[in-house]
Image (spheres, grey):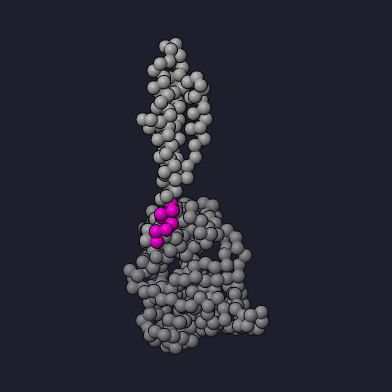
Amino acid sequence: MALKDTIQSLMTQVEGLKATNAEEVEAMRIKYLSKKGEITALFNEFRSVPAEEKRELGQLLNHLRQTAETRINDLREQISDQMVNVQKENDLTRTPDPIVLGTRHPLSLVREEIEEIFSRIGFTIAQGPEVEDDKHVYGMLNFAPEHPARDMQDTFFIEKEAGVQKPTDVLLRSHTSSVQTRVMTSQKPPIRVLCPGRVYRNEAISARAHCFFHQVEGLYIDKNVSFADLREALLYFSKEMFGPETKIRLRPSYFPFTEPSAEMDISCNICGGTGCSFCKGTGWVEILGCGMVDPNVLEACGIDSKEYSGYAFGMGVERITNLKYRVKDLRLFSENDVRFLKQFESC
Ligand code: DAH
């Protein structure tokens, strides 16, 4: 066979080479590329080719050798990769694949910042159950049965027997104020606690509302606690949280468990108080409810309301997080999308 035809036929063979183990690959290398290999033999033959054919055949021959070398090396790598995988699977002592570290959730970051600020002025953390009873969530907090104030919070009640809808006093707490009653009935004043936790309300889920969210409640009970103390503590918190320029304003409001009650706004930290779409042009944004603990609540919890007075406040962690990080859609907090969560890596 002419040299050119031999080169072409070897080329077809080489291109179709397949192997299932390292021995087969080595046999191929010997067959084609070793000193006595078929391709090496062609180089010997090449020496006696007439000068005018040398150029073309030389190129073809070099191309053949390169193709064979590449193909055999590729096969060798493939097989060694397969071997490594098999070994890995069989080796029960191997270190697992590296763990991808997650990031702190923005709500945790903000909750911890709130806790940290209040801890500097003497507050400690208290917690209570999420599945609560009517007494701790409403009754002891001065919500009379059937009182319309209960409609402010659309509560999830829990059936005691599956499928049987009897009147029930087991419910998912709709606010962290229930922890106040638990602390006041189990501790003696002075009391200075911060109660962070998850709360539940029967709301249609949208960008602005969810069926669960997070609150931080504050409670301070001692002799001679005044509204001025409440204002001072909240001003301190607001400046620490949103910056020293922050102003606060208290507007009269109503909560059954405080008297007097107020809602607190901070000067909008987005426009600096000049008015923007976030504060609806008012320059103020509401962040919490507060007031002086109603004497009825103190008495219901066994604290003498003639000797002691106190203040309380409650804020939504999602709201504070929105103000700090401008998260426009509340649902992002519970969707577990790592692309969202990763953005808080450096916070
Ligand atoms: N519990 C109220 C709510 O969920 C918030 C609140 C208002 C808590 C005033 C308080 C308070 O402790 O004093 O809407």
Q: How many marks?
A: 0
- Judge whether 12 appears above or below 204 on screen: above
Relative to 52, residue 265 above or below: below
Specify whether 260 is left or right of 226. right
- Judged left or right of residue 15, residue 246 is left
Residue occupying the point 42% across, 11% down: 51
Q: Quadrant of the C terminus?
A: bottom left
Tell me the residue at 45%/82% (across/down).
182
Residue at horizontal 54%, vertical 74%? 174
Q: Nearer the viewer, residue 194 or 311?
A: 194
Measured as percent of width and height from the top left, residue 310 is found at 42, 79
88 magenta-colored: yes
- Kindly tell me whether residue 242 is visible in this rendering: no
Can residue 194 be seen here? The reply is yes
Q: Nearer the viewer, residue 113 or 242?
A: 113
Q: Which quadrant would residue 168 be assigned to in this image?
A: bottom right
Instruction: Give the magenta part as a residue range.
Output: 85-92
Residue 191 location in percent, x, y?
Answer: 38, 80
Write the residue at 42% across / 58% down.
90
> Does residue 241 sit above or below 253 in this rendering?
above
Decide whether residue 215 is among the magenta residues. Answer: no
